[in-house]
């Protein structure tokens, strides 16, 4: 097979050292000199497991022990291998990574899967193990769903009995009310009548006294003819008038009725007194993070200083976006922490970011603007028109596809909503007032419970705020949660918080219970994010001695 390539001129062979642009060619010269040809790959060596151009295939197989290598054209090789060649490194796939669910060539392993260890298996064994894990998970879920079906059947049979039981309780309450009211009704009636009787007697007595006086006066002729009676009569009339006026002031109108308490009134004024309520409670299990990849952050030639990633978030299951506050830029990483692209910001110091919707992220900074980023499918980041806002927002998180929740730095009305069109609004009902300095607090949002989650670094506490005002604030403390900083929400609204002093990640359930803590292999973790499928956890730290970026598999 090799003989067919010997006709390629040696002059053409020498030209590959004069080119500076690398191709997909797998020439060994490329790995040594960093130079290769412009030519497209045309051949594949099944022994070297590499692709070559028409020039390099000759020069890489001149040694005697390489002359017998099996070389074929790419179209033939693709048929033999099923196209199982790494497009990035021009080498055949040899292993399968169970953590990343991907094929790996030798260079893939050395560059992005060094921490995968026992999860790297030969292709056939890897496929089989992956399928076995999927089948095991699917079987376990199927059993859980079967139990749920049985539980639904049981509960649906219980509900009619619960309604009858509640009906009997209500009827019993009304029977007791009727018995109690009937027994006291006569007493109340007599009590009111006894109160009215003396007033009625006074009025009748006064009326009789007046009638008697009138009869006496009539027997003496006209009133003016009895001069000696005039002063007495005037005094008597004044006394009558005063007594009647006093009775008028004490007069009242009586209406006797039954007053039901508010709960009964509400019951009778509603169209429905009950409905079926379905509560979905997702089980929270303590995670077991296992380090997959890690990198020590070093200053690059284009950077002003060593990177400091103060906030990072998964864009999707395979990409992470982070803000570098020291170099004022946004960086896009792959899930194995390889840098895909970056973009400089407009001379502002970024402090937080939130991935709002597919490919859209917002970056807050120490300025009155919020930068809007577009992350495209070809791994490029574009700066869109920034939002002009009234405050500097020190932390931000997604609320829905159009709105984020933010913390306004140094403002008592710290927790606010900001939409992608720049509209700012307070929560209604108003949340408790509290002013935060830069770096004192981080924010997250639980969509299911409509709850804001705030970490207060210097108070060593995480606080839940129900934005509907239905529940009072819940304060969460724990001995392993000291200097809580970065915060992220995973599936089932499980919360992950960086405990800076304890060098750990604290896991909190959506109802405010600490599920567990996990030590990680870095000091002073300050930023964390969970992938949408909750299988990966990325963590950055903030220390002067050794800044790092780690990614963990979650089990």
Image (tube, rainbow, N blue to C red):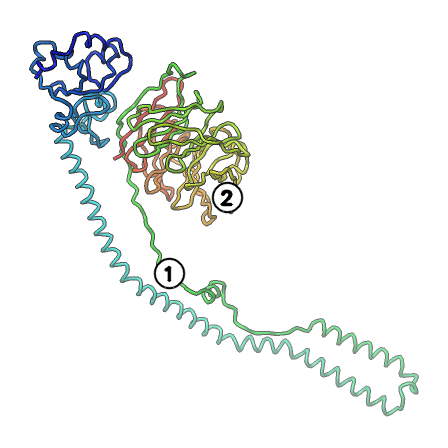
Toward the viewer: 516 or 134?
Answer: 134
Q: CA distance from mark 2 to mark 1?
A: 29 Å
Classify residue 278 as left or right of residue 173. left
Q: Is residue 85 above or below residue 398?
A: above
Q: Which residue is mark 1?
A: 275
Q: Position of residue 337 (x, y in %)?
A: 31, 25
Label 2 packing within 10 angstroms: few (<14), some (14-19), many (20+): some
Q: Is residue 467 above or below residue 95?
A: below
Q: Position of residue 366 (x, y in %)?
A: 50, 27
Label 1 packing within 10 angstroms: few (<14), some (14-19), many (20+): few
* Quadrant position of residue 13: top left
Classify residue 64 as left or right of residue 83. left
Toward the viewer: 461 or 84?
Answer: 84
Q: Secondary structure at mark 1?
A: loop
Can residue 428 be seen here? The reply is yes
Classify residue 355 as left or right of residue 391. left
Can residue 475 be seen here? The reply is no
Q: Say whether marks 2 and 1 touch (CB < 8 Å).
A: no
Q: Quadrant of the C terminus?
A: top left
Q: Position of residue 467 (x, y in %)?
A: 46, 45
* Quadrant position of residue 159: bottom left
Task: Please tell me which residue is depicted at 9% across the width and 17% down the height of the picture.
Answer: 69
Q: Is residue 99 above or below residue 491?
A: above
Q: Position of residue 41 (x, y in %)?
A: 20, 20
Classify residue 5 as left or right of residue 36. left
Q: Which residue is mark 2?
A: 427
């Amino acid at each position: 097979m090799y003989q067919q390539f010997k006709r390629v001129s040696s002059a053409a062979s020498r030209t590959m050292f004069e080119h500076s642009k690398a191709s997909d060619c797998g020439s060994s010269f490329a790995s040594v000199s960093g130079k290769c040809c412009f030519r497209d790959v045309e051949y594949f060596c099944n022994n070297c497991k590499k692709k070559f151009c028409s020039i390099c295939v000759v020069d890489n197989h001149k040694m005697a022990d390489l002359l017998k290598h099996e070389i074929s054209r790419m179209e033939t090789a693709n048929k033999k291998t099923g196209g199982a060649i790494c497009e990035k490194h021009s080498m055949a796939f040899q292993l399968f990574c169970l953590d990343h669910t991907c094929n790996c060539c030798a260079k893939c392993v050395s560059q992005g899967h060094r921490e995968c260890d026992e999860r790297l298996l030969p292709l056939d064994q890897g496929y089989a193990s992956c399928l076995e894990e999927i089948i095991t998970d699917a079987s376990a879920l199927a059993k859980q769903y079967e139990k749920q079906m049985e539980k639904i059947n049981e509960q649906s049979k219980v509900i009619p009995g619960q309604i009858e039981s509640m009906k009997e309780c209500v009827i019993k309450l009304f029977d007791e009310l009727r018995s109690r009211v009937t027994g006291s009704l006569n007493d109340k009636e007599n009590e009111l009548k006894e109160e009215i009787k003396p007033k009625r007697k006074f009025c009748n007595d006064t009326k009789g006294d007046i009638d008697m006086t009138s009869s006496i006066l009539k027997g003496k002729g006209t009133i003016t003819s009895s001069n000696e009676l005039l002063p007495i009569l005037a005094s008597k009339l004044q006394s009558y008038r005063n007594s009647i006026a006093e009775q008028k002031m004490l007069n009242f109108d009586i209406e006797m009725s039954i007053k039901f308490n508010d709960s009964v009134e509400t019951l009778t004024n509603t169209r429905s007194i009950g409905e079926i309520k379905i509560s979905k409670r997702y089980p929270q299990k303590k995670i077991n993070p296992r380090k997959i990849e890690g990198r020590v952050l070093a200053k690059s030639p284009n950077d002003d200083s060593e990177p400091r990633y103060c906030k990072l978030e998964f864009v999707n299951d395979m990409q992470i976006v982070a803000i570098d506050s020291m170099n004022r830029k946004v960086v896009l990483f792959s899930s194995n922490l390889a840098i895909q692209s970056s973009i400089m910001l407009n001379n502002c110091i970024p402090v937080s970011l939130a991935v709002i919707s597919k490919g859209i992220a917002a970056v807050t900074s120490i300025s009155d603007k919020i930068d809007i980023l577009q992350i495209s499918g070809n791994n490029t980041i574009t700066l869109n028109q920034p939002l002009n806002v009234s405050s500097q927002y020190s932390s931000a998180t997604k609320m829905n596809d159009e709105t984020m929740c933010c913390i306004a730095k140094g403002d008592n009305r710290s927790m606010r909503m900001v939409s992608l069109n720049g509209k700012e609004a307070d929560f209604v009902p108003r949340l408790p007032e509290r002013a935060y300095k830069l770096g004192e607090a981080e924010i997250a949002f639980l969509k299911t419970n409509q709850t804001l989650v705030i970490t207060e670094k210097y108070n060593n506490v995480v606080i839940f705020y129900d934005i509907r005002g239905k529940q009072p604030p819940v304060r969460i403390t724990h001995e392993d949660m000291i200097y809580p900083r970065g915060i992220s929400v995973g599936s089932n609204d499980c919360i992950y918080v960086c405990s800076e002093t304890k060098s750990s990640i604290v896991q909190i359930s959506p109802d405010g219970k600490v599920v567990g803590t996990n030590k990680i292999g870095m000091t002073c973790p300050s930023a964390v994010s969970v992938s949408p499928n909750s299988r990966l956890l990325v963590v950055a730290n903030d220390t002067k001695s050794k800044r790092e970026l780690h990614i963990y598999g979650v089990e």
